[in-house]
Image (cartoon, grey):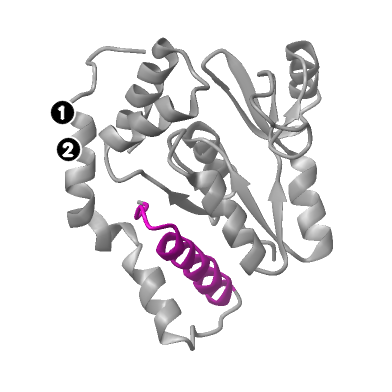
Amino acid sequence: MTAVFIISAPSGSGKSTLVNNVRKLIPDLEFSVSYTTRAPRGNEQNGREYFFISRPEFEARIAKNEFLEYADVFGNYYGTARRFLQQAEEHGHDLLLDIDVQGAAQIKSKIPEAVSIFILPPNRQQLEQRLRDRGLDTEEVIQRRLLNASREIEVNDRLDESTENLKSILIAERLKRSGQRVADDSVRRRAESCRLDNVRERLKPILASFASTAVPGGN
């Protein structure tokens, strides 16, 4: 049975780099490229980062029920085509989704056994600096992204360790679904250490950095 792994994170959290690293390490893992109505940024290419389509075309696909999930984020549609799950099932592979929390909630409602993994930057200040450094958003959008992050609220800022953590989670969940025991203790320990119940104390200062600067009543 195809396992579905959902990776969600605030924009600027380093999620794309982390996902790309893990995809090189985990075999038989298909990746869903999302559709969006926003314009390409920087050196983004159609079919690589996203499939860039017009709003009317996106809405026509909605009407045909072609999306497994979709959401309107900052005035642009983003969605996951059903065909990616169908292709993964046909190939006997697992599926990795890189989507926002709205989409993740939709997937979990349709596929309750999907594994949801949420990634956060070390704190609000570093997230804001990353958003500014990449130079892709206006000040208004940056503030809206930060507010969204404060509402959505783990990733360690050391990429190698974060990659190993995510890899361990995917391996452990795969073995669990197949009824096998995780023989590698280091994999088991890493995966367990990332479960919500085991990271609550580490999360407190991160959450506090967002809560202390969140704008009440914003949209």
Determine if residue 112 is in view.
Answer: no
What segment carries the magenta color?
A: 155-177
For image coordinates 79% across by 50% down, the residue present is 86
Magenta stretch encompasses residue 159: yes
Picture residue at 31% right of the left edge, 12% below the top = 218
Dot label at residue 83: none
Q: Residue at x 74, y 23 (%)?
A: 62
Binning the other alpha carbons within 10 Å of mark 1 as few (below 14), some (14 to 19) or many (20 upward) gives few
Specify few, some or many for label 2: CA neighbours under 10 Å numbering under 14, 14-19, or 20 or more: some
Tell me where residue 125 appears, x and y as whole percent.
Answer: 26, 33
Pointers 2 and 1 in contact (C-beta within 8 Å):
yes
Taking the magenta stretch, the answer to whether it contains residue 126 is no
The secondary structure type at the circle numbered 2 is helix
Q: Residue at x 78, y 59 (%)?
A: 89
Q: Residue 97: x, y in percent?
A: 61, 47
Toward the viewer: 181 or 145?
145
Q: Is residue 163 left or right of residue 197?
A: right
Identify which amino acid the numbered label 1 is placed on: Ser
Residue on which the image places disc 1: 212
On residue 208, the disc is 2
Give the quadrant of the N terminus: bottom right
> Whole-percent x and y of residue 45?
75, 33
187 versus 31 height, above or below: below
The amino acid type of the residue labelled 2 equals Ala
Residue 20 or residue 33, whichever sits in front? 20
In the image, residue 53 above or below residue 113: above
Q: Main secondary structure of the magenta part?
A: helix
- Give the SS element for disc 1: loop
